[in-house]
Image (cartoon, coloured by chain):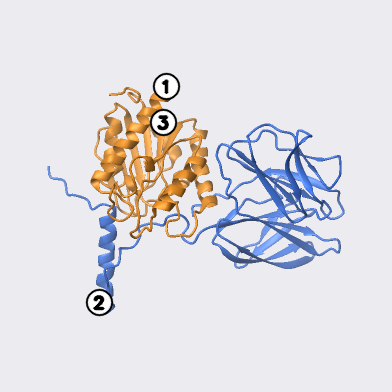
Chain colours: A blue, B orange
Amino acid sequence: MIRKKEPDISARATIGLLAGCAALLLGSVPCGAADPPRLYDSGPARGAGFIRIANVTNGVVSITPAGRARIDISAEDALRVTRFEALTPGKIAASIRVGNQTRKLNVAIAANELVTVAIGVAANGSIATTVFRETPRDFNALRSSLALFGADRTCANARLVADQSTVVIAGVAPGSLGRKTVNPVKVALAVFCAKETRGLPAELGQLEAGERYSVLVFAAQGAARRVLALRDEMAVTRD
Amino acid sequence: MNMALAGLVLLVIGDSHMVSQGYLISSLHESLVSQQAIVHSYGACGVNAGDWVYGTSGTCGQAERHERGAPRIDYSSKAKGWTVRELIERHRPDLIVVQMGDTMAGYGQSTLPNAWIYGKVRALTTAIRAQNVSCMWVGPPWGSGGRYEKTTARVREMSHYLSQVVPPCTYIDSTAFARPGEWPTIDGQHLTASGYRAWGKSIADSIVSLAGRSQK
């Protein structure tokens, strides 16, 4: 039996180009010897940045991105921090509501950048936002990555300490973050501010290889300073 | 013949390099079958690693091949795709071979989309690990120019990056098999028939060697 030979991937793209050229010629548009088009993209067509929101208030934070539906973020610890959402690099705009207060959020996100926006309430009752930016290059499936986010304005020189004595991350100023790659071990972590000798525990337990973790130190309005430790997650998308 | 693969069930999944007659669905599949492995190969053109978790939709074709049968290639846009989970449940493989890299490397872009890649790769390696199956990951071969804007520098960067992020899969570095330009391409990315023969055989030899080592 003689089997008809199927055109391969590249031949099919060429056929597509020729069909396109024929259509263009009918419209008197010149069609040169350009390569046929790609059959598919290599990675996200215009790059990808990522954003997540951290609710460091006592109540619900509502975000309404321009042109999209409102998202309510609970103040329950398991839900305070959203997953990282992938988006095309550029500027994004949203409105924020906390209680009766509202304000605009405008953030520019670059390719490969991971942005965490902490939303809190300032002493005067207005909404306060802190934008943390990182462009990590430490992705590694055999190690773990730990980050300390300084979201409490009163916590100077924050430090993440392992097993009461080993400083993992030091010198994190309010509004900034530090990150470090570590071995995937079970470790007791605590956060210390300034010259304080008593730390606040950050419960992560056994670190897993390839996972990334965030430790946030923050103080909700009228409440004591506290620490939230979580595993970073990326939203499931098909893009 | 080395008996390292004899009787093992191998599931091979990949991208456009697996979708046309004479590509890896020919050369790699046949090389593994010649090692007495029971081989099931699937390719979906244009998909990234995450698509194997959420469901492939080969917009530019897909192919499958089983044991000593002929490849079944479907270039229609209506072809039903697959998930790695359903393929694992269907074939119960001893080893999964993932051939993936070119569809994620950001050819033509100024930087490697490393965070995006990490999310996609982790999604797939986590899904495979959840099914408790061993895996090997085959990175991209050299290529340059053409409509895909592949470059030697980006292939080198991508290959190094994949070696860091694919564990627990064992990484097979395709750039070690040939010098840049040694295997000609037809479009800067897809190899000629002789290139696919050489690439498929080199991958199979690596799998045999790694499998033999893990059995000792």
* Residue depicted at 63% across the width and 50% down the height: A83
Give the CA distance from mark 3 to mark 1: 13 Å
Looking at the image, residue B162 sits to the left or right of residue B3; the answer is right
Chain letter of disc 3 in the image: B
> What is the residue that sits farthest to the top in this orientation?
B216
x then y, percent, for residue B58:
37, 51
The picture quadrant where one finds residue B3 is: top left
x then y, percent, for residue B156:
43, 48
| Residue A26, numbered label | 2
**Whether residue B65 can be seen here:** no
Chain letter of disc 1 in the image: B
| Residue B215, numbered label | 1
Identify the image quadrant of the N terminus of chain A: top left
Name the element at disc 3: strand
Looking at the image, residue B209 sits to the left or right of residue B106; the answer is left
Are callouts 2 and 1 both on one chain? Answer: no
Residue hosting label 3: B95
